[in-house]
Image (cartoon, rainbow, N blue to C red):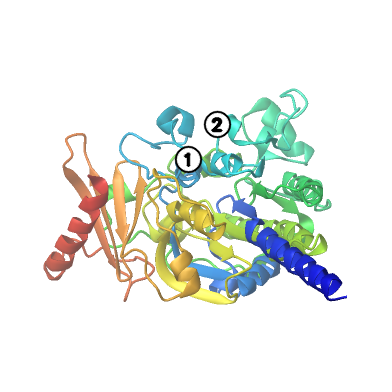
Amino acid sequence: MKKELLTASLLASSLLMAEQSFAQEQKKNVLFIVVDDLRPLLGCYGNTVVKTPNIDKLASQGTVFTNAFANYPVSGPSRASFLSGLRPNNTRFTSNETSVESDANDAIVLPQFFKQNGYITAGLGKVFHHPKDKVESWTDKHWHPTMGQTKAEHPDGWRDYLLEENIELCRTEQTGNSYEVANVSDYDYFDGILAKKAIEKMTNYAKQDKPFFLTVGFVKPHLPFNAPKKYFDMYPLENIKMPDNFYQPKNVPSQAMHNWYELRAYKDIPKKQDPMSEEKAKELIRAYYACVSYADAMVGEVLNTLETLKIADNTVVVLIGDHGWNLGEHTLWVKHSNFNNALNTTCIVKSPDVKGGQVSNSLVELLDIYPTLCDLTNQKQPSHLEGKSLLPILQKPEFEVRQSACSKMDNGWSVKTHDYRYTEWYNEKGEVEGRMLYNHKTDKAENENIAEYESSKEIVQKMKKLLAEYVK
């Protein structure tokens, strides 16, 4: 009898040790959501106008980073940067045509890293700006709703129009209108199709033994602002307000301004140097809000699936915008600038073993996502990474991993501290040809450039020295 009890005890002990070993070895899944052009106009960031209940729910379960900044306010270089873990510089990730393969082919990109560590890796929608960039990173072939389309059948391509008026414009000209209101379901536009595909993939992966690294790249609120009518109905045009600073900043250098050429390409937008009317501006603001709410609904579909599949407790979720967006502030639209609205972006991180409902004002860069995901999944960081892990901030939101954040746009470099943003533009000889300094303690909207004021000399020198550390 004693022998039987001893055998049973040893068996129980052995099973317990095996379960503990399995728990220790079990790797967390990663769901990485990238939303194109998503400025942090969200409820969880304090916005009271734009309706984003699903992203707000994720924020209540994770950590919201209020001071997260893109390293380049254009999709191509921004994505190449945070997916490779390398900072843009004067020769790397310098335009929208850039790719990791062309500029830093030896870098182990984020999905490739997880593939090497035994993960199923899949990319859906817009992940890398160029779908053919680093295709060997995916164990499951990259998928986008445009795949299989021909130009003849779908002349609108990635712009994803549903109304015949806009599709016909794409046949005769390159673009249709800047936005589209269609009385269709959520699943007729690409982002709805993308959400369905993500649900299908996760349902399949949940049945497999391997952990997954799934990146879902939603298109909206990228131009054109196309969304189902019900999302436009959330924002009556008569309730839309213009930005308080629909004017150029005082003392602004010419290098800081641009002609919002991306938006100018659309049929209903004033051409060349013509100004935007207040009526059209309000239409665009409304359309952007509608697309944010549409993207939020599709994000919700994907996040709810984690709960349905009962894998939320073993899945790290990161949601970011690839950069910010200008909505008429300083008379600017789209991104392509060194102003805070184009650089400040959405960043929310949720991990099963980290307290939720946190807000951190610490300075972070999108470059920091790669090392953070390494740490959250208990894997050694590759040696080439130039970002900093945000794990210390997740554990203690007031912790600082960096004293400044750097961004670049063309030949303009910008550095952000908690109190200031400083920007310099360089000519071909490396000489400064324009600069800006904004005091974010008193002028968060960046309406008065104080770089040339006598009273700013000391802080300009301090910021200049900070910036030089990045530029060199």
| Disc 1 target residue | 80
Q: Could you tell me which secondary element the residue under label 1 belongs to?
A: helix
Residue 281 drawn above or below residue 263: below
Q: List x then y, in percent, for residue 255.
A: 29, 46
Identify the disc placed on residue 389. none
In terms of image quadrants, where is residue 14?
A: bottom right
Q: List x then y, in percent, for residue 225.
A: 65, 50
Q: Quadrant of the N terminus?
A: bottom right
Do residues under tags 2 and 1 come within 8 Å of each other at their CB atoms?
yes
Q: List x then y, in percent, for residue 256.
A: 32, 50
Identify the disc placed on residue 133. 2
Residue 10 drawn above or below residue 285: below
Which of the pair 12/126 is nearer the observer? 12
Q: Residues within 10 Å of mark 1 (few under 14, many from 20)?
A: many
Kindly tell me whether residue 358 is visible in this rendering.
Answer: yes
Residue lying at 54% horizontally and 76% vertically, measured from the top left: 358
Apparent side of residue 306 relative to residue 331 in the rendered image (left or right): right
In terms of image quadrants, where is residue 401?
A: bottom left
